[in-house]
Amino acid sequence: MKFSHPAADIFVLDASVAPAAALARTTHLCVAAHQDDIEIMAYHGIAECFGRADRWFSGVVVTNGAGSPRSGVYANYTDAQMQDVRRQEQRKAAMVGDYSIQLQLAHPSSAVKDKSNAAVQSDLVEIFSAAGAEVVYLHQPADKHDTHIGVLAHSIAALRKIPADRRPKRVLGCEVWRDLDWMLDTDKVVLDAGQFPNLAMALVGVFDSQITGGKRYDLATAGRRIAHATYHTSHATDKFQGITWAIDLTPLVNDPSLSMADYTQGFIDRFKQDVAARLAKFA
């Protein structure tokens, strides 16, 4: 297994399992832009596989983490030092979550945001082809972080290159920067993020460089999941202890004629129509 960037990192917790075999057994796969995105957006997949012998979660981080904010003990770290810290933190998360394999492709953000970058896409084609995962978690298309959208666009293009019989059964766009609470309930995919709360906190908590750096992702992520669960329905008790919302991107993968912009705009238009119709009843 060899990727285009020389600094790409391949980590398998079980040394007796070859990387190719660890990727091949993957049932739930997340492709994310940055270190810690996986643990925020795809906890559902991690929990679905945790402690199971028949399900395996694997993670892919596309960028190198060089642009991370830093303060406290990390205030004077160079970009190279921060990349090493972030790489090790992501490995720690893979250990805590018992991932099958953790891949870090080490591309700079500038390469990811270049829609014509063949290296990023070829790496993802190789991964999707080798994994054959049933469920793939990606960034959601209404996210406000350009690097996230770049990774999403490359991922969709790569998945479309995979033979139809090798594509995942479900492709889900998940929350990081911008949540999806605004979507119509009929459009939302509900992902149970309330299992193993101690595991959930530990996974985000290992990213000390972010938390010490002034971003309490550990508290914010848990709070958002709990809020989603409570505000899911107004006339029923909470079904889950935590929820992550997702957009079903499977149609986008299976129909190359669909543009990501038009597909996403459809969700926004339905939300707009719902608000207008509700207000009209009381005008």
Image (cartoon, rainbow, N blue to C red):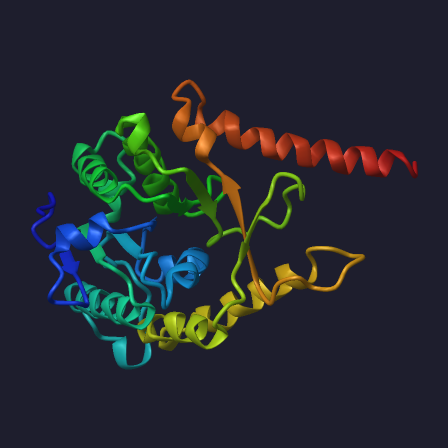
The answer to which of 60 and 78 lies nearer the viewer is: 60
Q: Residue furthest front?
A: 54
- For the question of whether residue 32 can be seen, the reply is no
The answer to which of 178 and 195 lies nearer the viewer is: 195
Q: Quadrant of residue 250?
A: top left
Q: Quadrant of residue 236?
A: bottom right
Tell me: 17 left or right of 125. left
Q: Is residue 88 above or below residue 177?
A: below
The answer to which of 190 and 222 lies nearer the viewer is: 190
Q: Residue furthest bottom?
A: 73
Residue shown at the point (62%, 39%) measured from the top left: 187
The answer to which of 24 and 67 lies nearer the viewer is: 24
Image coordinates of residue 51 in percent, x first then y, are 36, 68
Residue shown at the point (23%, 58%) measured from the top left: 102
Image coordinates of residue 106 in percent, x first then y, are 18, 52
Image coordinates of residue 251 in percent, x first then y, are 47, 29
